[in-house]
Image: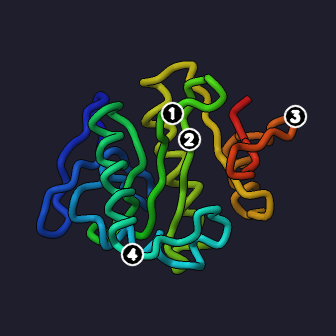
């Protein structure tokens, strides 16, 4: 958990995980090498990828590549996507959520991301994890807007983005994969 802006270690299973922040029910941690099975379980599931233009991961190699990117983002920027666990079961990853720094249309932005196991859907975890991630990252990067790239048919995700303060682009812009761009005002 963060104290005065510094992450602390929290033991979850055989290895210590750096905890980024925590909320009332959730713990957000830095992804680490041993998380490939959790990445594959969530990102390889067709149901969790129903609106993903790239579809689910077909093998663990794709999940390892994604995980390597998550780890590299943290090393480079000091911020990135997090593992999400409940406080009751901190060793069990139920999802991934957080903010990733990148460039969209020539502007430096945070991409807001949330993807959870179907068993975690409908419990408010995505909103809670997203709020916690934003509360942790945004004060350290003032002025960097938050965007969410969402498939037009993914109504639950669009509603969540709007509850989090991200509005659809007024010009109806989409990214190169056909996703609507939602952003902070």
At 32% from the left and 40% from the top, the residue drawn is 74
Q: Which of marks 4 and 2 is in front?
A: 4
Q: Which mark is residue 5?
A: none
Residue 17, image quadrant: bottom left
Classify mark 1: helix, strand or loop: strand
Classify mark 3: helix, strand or loop: loop
Graded by Cα atoms within 10 Å as few (under 14), some (14 to 19) or many (20 or more), the crowding at tag 4 reads: few
Q: Is residue 88 visible?
A: no
Q: Which of marks 4 and 3 is nearer the N terminus?
A: 4
Residue, disc 1? 102
Residue, disc 2? 111
Q: Can residue 182 be seen in this view?
A: yes
C-alpha gap between disc 2 and disc 1: 7 Å
C-alpha gap between disc 3 and disc 2: 19 Å
C-alpha gap between disc 3 and disc 1: 21 Å
Q: Residue 171 carries which label?
A: 3
Q: Nearer the viewer, residue 9 or 30?
A: 30
- Tell me if residue 109 comes above or below residue 133 in the rendering: above
C-alpha gap between disc 1 and disc 4: 26 Å
C-alpha gap between disc 4 and disc 2: 25 Å
Q: Earlier in the sequence, mark 3 or mark 2?
A: 2
Residue, disc 4? 59
| In contact (CB < 8 Å): disc 2 and disc 1 | yes
Q: Which of marks 3 and 1 is nearer the N terminus?
A: 1
- Tell me if residue 128 comes above or below residue 170 in the rendering: below
Q: Which of marks 4 and 2 is nearer the N terminus?
A: 4
| In contact (CB < 8 Å): disc 4 and disc 2 | no
Residue 105, image quadrant: top right
Classify mark 4: helix, strand or loop: loop
């Amino acid at each position: 958990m963060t104290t005065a802006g510094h992450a602390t270690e929290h033991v979850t299973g055989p290895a210590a995980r750096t905890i980024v922040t925590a909320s009332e029910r959730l713990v957000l941690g830095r992804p680490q090498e041993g998380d490939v099975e959790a990445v594959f379980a969530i990102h390889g599931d067709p149901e969790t990828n129903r609106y993903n233009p790239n579809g689910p991961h077909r093998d663990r190699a794709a999940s390892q590549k994604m995980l390597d990117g998550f780890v590299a983002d943290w090393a480079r920027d000091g911020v990135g996507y997090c593992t999400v666990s409940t406080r009751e079961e901190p060793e069990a990853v139920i999802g991934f959520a957080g903010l990733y720094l990148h460039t969209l249309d020539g502007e430096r932005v945070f991409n807001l991301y949330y993807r959870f196991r179907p068993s975690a859907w409908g419990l408010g975890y995505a909103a809670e994890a997203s709020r916690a991630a934003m509360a942790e990252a945004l004060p350290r990067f003032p002025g960097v807007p938050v965007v969410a790239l969402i498939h037009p048919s993914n109504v639950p995700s669009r509603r969540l983005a709007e509850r989090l303060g991200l509005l659809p682009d007024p010009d109806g812009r989409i990214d190169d994969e056909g996703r609507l761009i939602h952003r902070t005002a």
